[in-house]
Image (cartoon, helix red, strand yellow):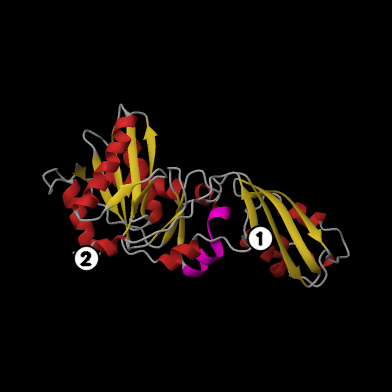
């Protein structure tokens, strides 16, 4: 296959590049490229970020969040994860989709990895998931992209995808938690991920008999614009989340407070407080002030600071009450 080279590790730009290549890149023959992301969580198109991702952990570790244009579950990327994208024209998805996956599977096997494709959009080795993949169709074009876990930090992966504390029932697609493994255990011939990447590129391009293709400066700018206006925005990464119902309780100075709220496109669409707490005034005024706010502690706290919260929740500060809105 012809190939692009993409050395960018910005997850928002890389999501934009996938969309650009699927929808706009001039295609004759099938094209592939290999790429990596800095530490990030990539959620599926149909997922609710609040039920899939440990957002406080991401914030504390500087891990970025990005939403892709394909379905499937949330995945953790770091620089020890190698991603692949294959884009081409297709008149027969039943033939071409499995064919694209065979490129990757056969390449792994040629390197000595006993890889298998299972029925859940995974590539496994000895029963452990080493790759997840997904597809998207645009007119007569097909894109397949996926991960290849070379030496990913499994502890960080587990924390990033574990939602603490609250109960959040979402209408989105829940991630399938799987046993995972790293390909490095099966590739002793490589000293690092760059050697693995070079070998895989060579196999998929038939030892570079197939030519490298390039983005023009204009195409790079188009991709950067898609990144700026779509893939790096709150509206795409958080606001695209399907409707969900959130519930959480905390012991605060006023007593036990439980909040229940609907979240629609990432914003509070209705909230109610309950519990054995004490206050001079009913809590409905506080709930009303949250209507339309982005769901999350920072935006809720901004609204609460405009109120005298202690009149509704005795002895409780806006900062304490805002902790209820940590997923």
Dominant SS type (magenta): helix
Asked whether 205 or 323 is in front, the reply is 205
Q: Residue at x 63, y 59 (%)?
A: 299
Asked whether 173 or 262 is in front, the reply is 173
Query: Could you classify mark 1 by the number of other residues whose Cα lies within 10 Å: few (under 14), some (14-19), or many (20 or more)?
Result: many
Helix or strand or loop: what does disc 1 sit on? helix
Asked whether 298 or 66 is in front, the reply is 66
**In the image as oriented, which residue stretches furthest toward the right?**
280
Helix or strand or loop: what does disc 2 sit on? loop
Q: Position of residue 226 (x, y in %)?
A: 40, 45
Q: Quadrant of the N terminus?
A: top left
**In the image as oriented, which residue stretches furthest toward the front?**
126
Q: Residue at x 31, y 48 (%)?
A: 116
Depicted 29 relative to depicted 10: above or below: above
- Taking the image as shown, residue 279 lies to the left or right of residue 220, namely right
Q: Quadrant of the C terminus?
A: bottom right
Q: Which residue is mark 2?
A: 188
In this orientation, does residue 9 appear? Answer: yes
Real-space Cα separation, disc 1 to disc 2, in angstroms: 46 Å
Is residue 319 in the magenta section?
no
Depicted 159 relative to depicted 235: above or below: below
Q: Nearer the viewer, mark 1 or mark 2?
A: 2
Q: Position of residue 232 (x, y in %)?
A: 45, 52
Depicted 95 relative to depicted 189: above or below: above
Is residue 58 in the magenta section?
yes
- Taking the image as shown, residue 200 lies to the left or right of residue 173, namely left
The magenta-colored residue range is 51-61
- Taking the image as shown, residue 90 lies to the left or right of residue 48, namely left
Asked whether 110 or 251 is in front, the reply is 110
């Amino acid at each position: 296959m012809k190939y692009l080279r993409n050395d960018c590790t910005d997850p928002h730009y890389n999501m934009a590049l996938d969309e650009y290549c699927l929808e706009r890149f001039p295609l004759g023959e099938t094209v592939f490229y290999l790429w990596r992301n800095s530490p990030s969580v990539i959620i599926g198109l149909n997922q609710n970020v609040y039920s899939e991702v440990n957002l406080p952990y991401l914030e504390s570790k500087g891990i970025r969040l990005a939403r892709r244009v394909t379905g499937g579950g949330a995945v953790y990327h770091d620089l020890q994860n190698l991603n692949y994208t294959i884009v081409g024209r297709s008149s027969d998805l039943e033939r071409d989709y499995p064919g694209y996956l065979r490129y990757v599977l056969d390449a792994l096997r040629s390197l000595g990895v006993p890889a298998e494709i299972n029925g859940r959009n995974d590539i496994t080795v000895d029963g452990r998931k080493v790759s997840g993949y997904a597809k998207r169709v645009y007119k007569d074009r097909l894109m397949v992209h996926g991960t290849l876990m070379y030496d990913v930090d499994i502890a960080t992966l587990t924390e990033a995808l574990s939602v603490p504390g609250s109960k959040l029932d979402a209408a989105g697609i829940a991630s399938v938690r799987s046993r995972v493994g790293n390909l490095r255990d099966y590739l002793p011939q490589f000293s690092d991920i760059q050697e693995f990447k070079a070998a895989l590129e060579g196999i998929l391009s038939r030892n570079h008999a197939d030519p490298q293709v390039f983005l023009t400066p204009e195409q790079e700018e188009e991709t950067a614009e898609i990144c700026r206006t779509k893939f790096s925005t709150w509206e795409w990464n958080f606001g695209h989340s399907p409707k969900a119902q959130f519930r959480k309780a905390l012991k605060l100075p006023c007593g036990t407070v439980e909040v229940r709220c609907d979240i629609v496109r990432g914003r509070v669409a209705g909230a109610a407080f309950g519990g054995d707490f004490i206050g001079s005034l009913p809590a409905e005024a506080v709930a009303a002030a949250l209507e339309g706010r982005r769901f999350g502690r920072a935006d809720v706290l901004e609204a609460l600071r405009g109120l005298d919260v202690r009149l509704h929740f005795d002895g409780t500060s806006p900062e304490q009450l805002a902790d209820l809105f940590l997923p």
